[in-house]
Amino acid sequence: MERFFLYDDIEDTKTRFVSFTGKKLRYDLAIIQSTRFYGKVLVLDMQFGRFAIIGPDDLEEPGYLEYVFNKTEEEAEDLREYLMELLS
């Protein structure tokens, strides 16, 4: 079978594993930094199998974390606070 690749790159990345408890939930995250994401990070929620490429601008977008990680507003606030500290 012939394949048409748009790209097939290998890159060294920096991965940070972090676990913390918020007001309602425990968060188990893998945060991957790469030059591919133009200053943003890939955030993987390992408990619920969800992920997103996130930068400071995304954290200011109302409802974005709630939608991407399927969290209530209160649950997402803990995550938002942590990511704001990480990305600043």
Image: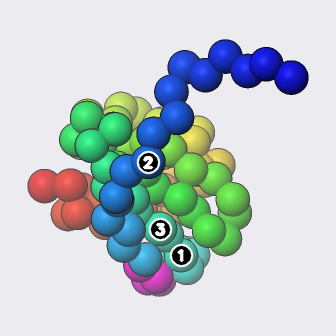
Task: Residue at 61% x, 22% y: name it.
Answer: 5
Q: Quadrant of residue 4?
A: top right
In the image: residue 27, left or right of residue 62? right
In whole angstroms, how far apart are the C-alphas of marks 1 and 2?
26 Å
Q: Nearer the viewer, mark 2 or mark 3?
A: 2
The residue identified by callout 1 is: 28
| Magenta-tinted stretch | 18-22
In this rendering, the count of numbered labels is 3
Q: Secondary structure at mark 2?
A: loop
Location of residue 18 by image quarter: bottom left
Contact between marks 1 and 2 (CB within 8 A): the answer is no
Residue 57 versus residue 31 in the image, above or below? above
Dot 1 amino acid type: Asp
Q: Earlier in the sequence, mark 2 or mark 3?
A: 2
Q: In this figure, which residue is indicated by the disc labeled 3?
A: 30
Classed neighbour count for the residue bearing mark 3: other residues with Cα under 10 Å, few (<14), some (14–19), many (≥20): some
Report if residue 21 lies within the magenta region: yes
Q: Amino acid at mark 3?
A: Ala
In the image: residue 69, left or right of residue 11: right
Residue 22 seen anywhere in this rendered image of the structure: no
Residue 11 seen from this side: yes
Q: Nearer the viewer, residue 7 or 13?
A: 7
Q: Amino acid at mark 2?
A: Ile
Q: Position of residue 86 (x, y in %)?
A: 23, 63
Q: Secondary structure at mark 3?
A: strand
51 is higher (above) or lower (below) than 61: below
Identify the image's colour scheme: rainbow, by chain, secondary structure or one colour. Answer: rainbow
Q: CA distance from mark 2 to mark 3?
A: 19 Å
Residue sitting at x 33%, y 38%: 37
| Residue of label 2 | 10
Can you tell which of label 1 and label 2 is closer to the viewer?
Answer: 2
